[in-house]
Image: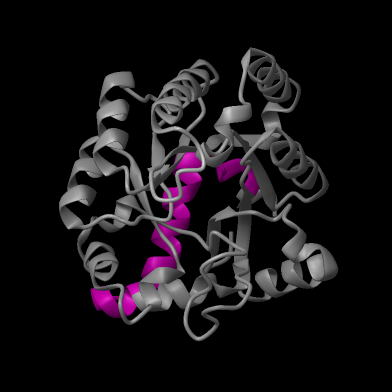
């Protein structure tokens, strides 16, 4: 592995936003020392596409799962398809998610969201896969369900963290990681900046959540993995440490959670 390297732990590479210049997106990422990208599934179709990317590129891994916006279409037949997808492609899959709760947009009934969040946690545990959790305006229900369904031997991450320091401390007690997106570079993101400054560095991950939430100075434009160093630089500034320490520690954290060590050494 290179002296300085980053892992984008959460990007939606299968989305149409990248179709026109996909090769250039990857080239820019490699030029910025992004050594690995995790492409995230949000439903059965996108999970399939993420796996196909992981099969094609050694520096991409996939996850599978159904986002809370889409769980009204999730039934027993769909669960069977997801299980088969994991069984057939296990070596390319490093996590289960993006799953969780979203009470902000309310695309799905809250009670139904909680039912399928719990069921998908159980499926992840069956396959011993780390959880990638979406949480929007649902902090306490997220924590309550994680505690109820624990322990989580494979661990997990609260992706695109949106809580305050008090909530971060609750998350850390579950032994989950906290992933910091480009929002941390926004001037009005004081709470997230406090979290990025104060949580233990060995529990912190970096992500773009691309194509969404591009960091300053690209705010409002398409996000991509090559912007990860901008997030790392902001965290280094907040913590008064070197960007090399942020890069290498967060890369080691991601490699540990998602068992990427062998994939990185082959590059």
Looking at the rendering, in which quadrant would you find the N terminus? bottom right
- The answer to whether 5 appears left or right of 200 in the picture is right
**Looking at the image, residue 91 lies above or below residue 163:** above
Q: Quadrant of residue 165?
A: bottom left
- The answer to whether 221 appears left or right of 238 in the picture is right
Instruction: State the residue at coordinates (54%, 59%).
Output: 209
Q: Quadrant of residue 67?
A: top right
* Residue 259: in magenta span: yes
Report whether residue 239 is seen: yes
Q: Name the outermost residue toward the left.
A: 166
Instruction: State the residue at coordinates (27%, 70%).
Output: 193
* Residue 161: in magenta span: no
Query: Closer to the camera, 158 or 253?
Result: 158
Instruction: State the residue at coordinates (47%, 49%).
Output: 254
Report whether residue 242 is seen: no
- The overriding secondary structure of the stretch rendered in magenta is helix
Looking at the rendering, in which quadrant would you find the C terminus? bottom right
**Looking at the image, residue 84 lies above or below residue 252:** above
Query: Closer to the camera, 116 or 91?
Result: 116
Residue 205 percent location from the top left of the image: 41, 55
Residue 221 percent location from the top left of the image: 60, 78
Q: Name the outermost residue toward the bottom.
A: 217
Residue 115 percent location from the top left of the image: 43, 21
Residue 180 percent location from the top left of the image: 39, 61
Instruction: State the residue at coordinates (56%, 65%).
Output: 212
Bounds of the magenta segment: 235-263
- The answer to whether 187 appears left or right of 244 in the picture is left
């Amino acid at each position: 592995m290179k002296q300085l390297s980053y892992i984008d732990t959460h990007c939606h590479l299968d989305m149409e936003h990248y179709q026109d210049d996909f090769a250039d997106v990857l080239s820019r990422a490699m030029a910025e020392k992004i050594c690995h990208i995790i492409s995230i599934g949000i439903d059965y179709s996108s999970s399939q596409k993420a796996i196909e990317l992981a099969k094609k590129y050694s520096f991409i891994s996939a996850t599978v799962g159904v986002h809370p916006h889409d769980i009204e279409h999730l039934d027993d037949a769909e669960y069977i398809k997801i299980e088969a997808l994991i069984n057939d492609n296990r070596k390319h899959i490093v996590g289960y998610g993006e799953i969780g709760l979203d009470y902000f947009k309310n695309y799905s009934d809250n009670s139904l969201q909680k039912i399928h969040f719990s069921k998908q946690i159980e499926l992840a545990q069956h396959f011993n896969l780390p959880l990638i959790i979406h949480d929007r305006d649902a902090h306490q229900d997220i924590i309550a369900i994680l505690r109820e369904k624990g322990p989580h031997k494979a661990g997990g991450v609260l992706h695109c963290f949106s809580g305050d320091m008090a909530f971060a401390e609750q998350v850390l007690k579950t032994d989950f990681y906290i992933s910091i997106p480009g929002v941390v570079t926004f001037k009005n993101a004081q709470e997230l900046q406090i979290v990025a400054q104060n949580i233990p560095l060995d529990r912190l991950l970096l992500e773009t959540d691309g194509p969404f939430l591009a960091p300053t100075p690209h705010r409002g434009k398409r996000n991509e993995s090559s912007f990860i160093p901008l997030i790392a630089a902001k965290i280094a500034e907040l913590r008064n440490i070197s960007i090399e320490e942020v890069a290498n520690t967060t890369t080691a954290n991601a490699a540990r959670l998602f068992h990427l060590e062998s994939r990185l050494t082959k590059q």
